Image: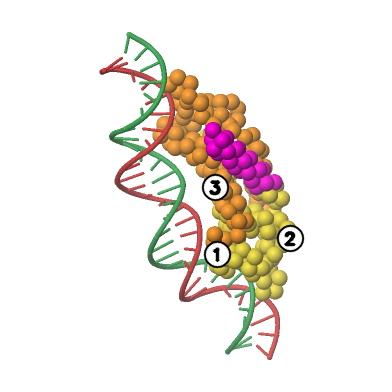
Chain colours: A orange, B yellow, C red, D green
Amino acid sequence: MQKPQKLEIQLLQAEICQALADPTRIMLLYLLAAGAKNVGDLGATLEASQPTVSRHLKVLRERGMVTAERLGTTVNYSLADRRVIEALDLLRAVMTDNLLQKTALVDLLNQA
Amino acid sequence: MQKPQKLEIQLLQAEICQALADPTRIMLLYLLAAGAKNVGDLGATLEASQPTVSRHLKVLRERGMVTAERLGTTVNYSLADRRVIEALDLLRAVMTDNLLQKTALVDLLNQA
DNA sequence: CAATCATATTCGTCTATCCAAATAAGTGTA
DNA sequence: TACACTTATTTGGATAGACGAATATGATTG
């Protein structure tokens, strides 16, 4: 033991956030939120290479954010917990509000 | 222009998530959720060095997640948008549920 | 048991991030 | 202006993450 347990929790929480810290993985989650899909379909939609998609899916799988199921030769991925999408939507709203505020400020400066 | 604008949005969203991908920054946000604080106080609570706290606060500031206000020699930081905390709470719940599920599985295996 | 299709992993390389230490910059006061 | 105090930034070195290319694994079919 080296640190209060509180930090351990934040560390695990940071690992989940880290999984969200990549645009490709965010896209993957949103795509899966619309329904289960296999690796090939996901790659085609994202225009990303197969190894890239597979590696990103592994990151999400290891953190329990998606689940995989073999169906013959293909593997179907599903969103494991919809609250991840809720969190992403919240953060997206924060981001868009920031952008709006920033552009409003720019407009104000341009007027002056 | 090189990619559909959709990707641009995910990129910005990923930048916000990236800001959450560090246990120290998560702690900072939770601390600020309880009320505005200056850099020294935050560092003392986190037992982190002053440059470390300042650097992390800069990351959060650049993404509009906290705001800074000078008060004499000190600088008071505040949480800019409470929805970031809501998102963190959601992700924390996802994480704890994953842990519970995992330990339940371990128990089952131990019984057998 | 080949051959094929879908997915996963490894390897090499590049870039990004983190921390500690040192230094700089801004503010209030003698 | 000099000094003390608080916060910010820079630098260097170590670690982790991302991608493409090549290769490996797993499942189905003939």
Does residue A55 show up magenta in the picture?
A: no
Q: State the image coordinates of residue B44 (x, y, percent, origin top left).
A: 63, 68
Mark 2 and mark 3: Cα distance apart in space: 26 Å
Query: Marks 1 and 2: same chain?
Result: yes
Mark 1 element type: helix
Foreground of the two, B105 or B33: B105
Q: Is residue A67 above or below residue C24?
A: above
Taking the spot 56% from the left edge, 35% from the top edge, the residue there is B111
- Give the mark nearest the N terminus, 1 or 2: 2
Q: Residues within 10 Å of mark 1 (few under 14, many from 20)?
A: few
Q: State the image coordinates of residue B90 (x, y, percent, origin top left).
A: 67, 43
Taking the spot 54% from the left edge, 59% from the top edge, the residue there is A1
The residue at which mark 3 appears reads as A15
Q: State the image coordinates of residue B40 (x, y, percent, origin top left).
A: 64, 69
Q: Is residue B89 above or below residue C22?
A: above
Mark 3 element type: helix
Foreground of the two, C14 or B25: B25
Numbered disc total: 3
Q: Amino acid at mark 2?
A: Gly
Q: Which residues are magenta?
A: B86-112
Given the image, what chain letter belongs to the residue carrying mark 3? A
The residue at which mark 2 appears reads as B35
Mark 2 element type: loop
Query: Marks 1 and 3: same chain?
Result: no
